[in-house]
Each structure stands twice: as structure tokens, then as C-alpha cells.
């Protein structure tokens, strides 16, 4: 079977990560795959924040936990040491679609690199907040950006879950 199709069929969301560090080279390869996602009209109106600093990673985790309504000390990033945040220009009407394609590429590239990953929501709420806007400003990011999602990335500390059976009736040939 084609390697890409194999990766699509075998990638699963991981919800427990080791604290092992990931090489910058591996992170760069995964981020690069995200940057090659298709985009409406070829505009490339997305950006990826590669969060490897523990203090910023933990700050985003705490913001996400509060937005999600979980009690402390829950970590919505499941211990993943790297968080790749996908942002899209807020005034771009295709921002969610384009950002979702970036997220898909990140998840598949992580799997192809032998790492675990999971898409975590609430990036929109994080970066609409004053605290989130201040984070972007502190990183030198100007303009209005919408958070599309977080790709939590790391070495899996659990077996890969089995695929759920595919539902019937999801193809219509015409």
C-alpha cells in the first residue's frame, strides 16, 4: 500500500506522552510538512508557532484547561513536550479550512516521524483573549490571528489505539 495512505489509515490520537525531548530537526521537518498544506488561492495565510519552551507550553496548557473547564492539575496537552499552534489570518474567509489542512499535515508528519500527536481545540479562545494577544505580541507577531488548533507532539507513552470501524453508508457514487 502507498506510504501516505498507510499513514492516513494508521495515525491515531495519542493521549499520553513521555517527557522526552524531540530534536529540533524533527520538529522542523514536521512544521515544514504543515507549511506545504494546500491553501485557498495559494495565499498561505497560516502560521505555526513551534512551542518548545516549557514555561510557554505550560502557560498555554493552563489557559486551555481553564477554557475547557477542567479542574487543576489536568493537562489538556497530555504531557506532550512540544505544542505546534496553527494560526490563520483572522480576516481570511478560508482560515478554518486552510488551518485544518495544516493541522492534518502536522498530524500525519508526526506519525511518519514515529511520534505521537493529537489535535487539541480551544486555540481560538486562547488567542482571542488579552493574554493570548499578549503572547503573540511578545513573540513579535502583529495583526489579527485566529487560533485554529494545537498539535500536541511527543513520544507516545501508550500503545496506539485501534482504529474504530468505519461507518457504512458514507460513500455515494453518482
Image: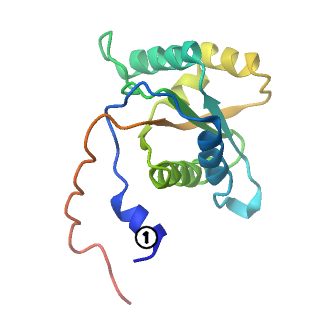
Q: Find residue 140 and report its image quarter.
A: top right
Residue at (77%, 56%) from the top-left corner?
43
Q: Which of 42 and 10 lies nearest the eye of the viewer? A: 10
Residue at (38%, 90%) from the top-left corner?
174
Q: Find residue 76 and report its image quarter.
A: top left
Q: Does residue 159 appear left or right of residue 112 in this picture?
A: left
Q: Which of 156 and 145 lies nearest the eye of the viewer? A: 156
Residue at (65%, 61%) from the top-left corner?
38
Q: Is residue 55 above or below residue 30?
A: above
Q: Is residue 58 above or below residue 10?
A: above
Picture coordinates of residue 155, whole percent (x, y): 41, 36
Picture coordinates of residue 126, whole percent (x, y): 54, 23
Q: Does residue 113 appear left or right of residue 1 in this picture?
A: right
Picture coordinates of residue 42, whole percent (x, y): 75, 61
Q: Which residue is mark 1?
A: 5
- Please say whether residue 94 is visible from this viewpoint: no
Q: Residues within 10 Å of mark 1 (few under 14, many from 20)?
A: few
Q: Quadrant of the N terminus?
A: bottom left
Residue pushed farthest bottom? 174
Residue at (53%, 20%) from the top-left corner?
57
- Please say whether residue 173 is visible from this viewpoint: yes
Number of callouts: 1
Q: What coloring was used for the rendering?
A: rainbow
Picture coordinates of residue 163, whole percent (x, y): 24, 57
Secondary element under disc 1, as helix, strand or loop, is: helix
Q: Is residue 101 above or below residue 155?
A: below
Amino acid at each position: 500500500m502507498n506510504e501516505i495512505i498507510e499513514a492516513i489509515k494508521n495515525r491515531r490520537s495519542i493521549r499520553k506522552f513521555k517527557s522526552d525531548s524531540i530534536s529540533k530537526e524533527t520538529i522542523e521537518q514536521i512544521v515544514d510538512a504543515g507549511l506545504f498544506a494546500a491553501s485557498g488561492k495559494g495565499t498561505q495565510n497560516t502560521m505555526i508557532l513551534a512551542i518548545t519552551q516549557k514555561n510557554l507550553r505550560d502557560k498555554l496548557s493552563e489557559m486551555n484547561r481553564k477554557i475547557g473547564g477542567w479542574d487543576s492539575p489536568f493537562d489538556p496537552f497530555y504531557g506532550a513536550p512540544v505544542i505546534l499552534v496553527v494560526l490563520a489570518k483572522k480576516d481570511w474567509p478560508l482560515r478554518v479550512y486552510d488551518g485544518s489542512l495544516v493541522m492534518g499535515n502536522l498530524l500525519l508528519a508526526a506519525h511518519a516521524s514515529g511520534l505521537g500527536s493529537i489535535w487539541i481545540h480551544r486555540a481560538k479562545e486562547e488567542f482571542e483573549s488579552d493574554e493570548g494577544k499578549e503572547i503573540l505580541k511578545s513573540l513579535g507577531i502583529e495583526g489579527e490571528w485566529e487560533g485554529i488548533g494545537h498539535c500536541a507532539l511527543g513520544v507516545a507513552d501508550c500503545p496506539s489505539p485501534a482504529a474504530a470501524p468505519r461507518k457504512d453508508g458514507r460513500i455515494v457514487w453518482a
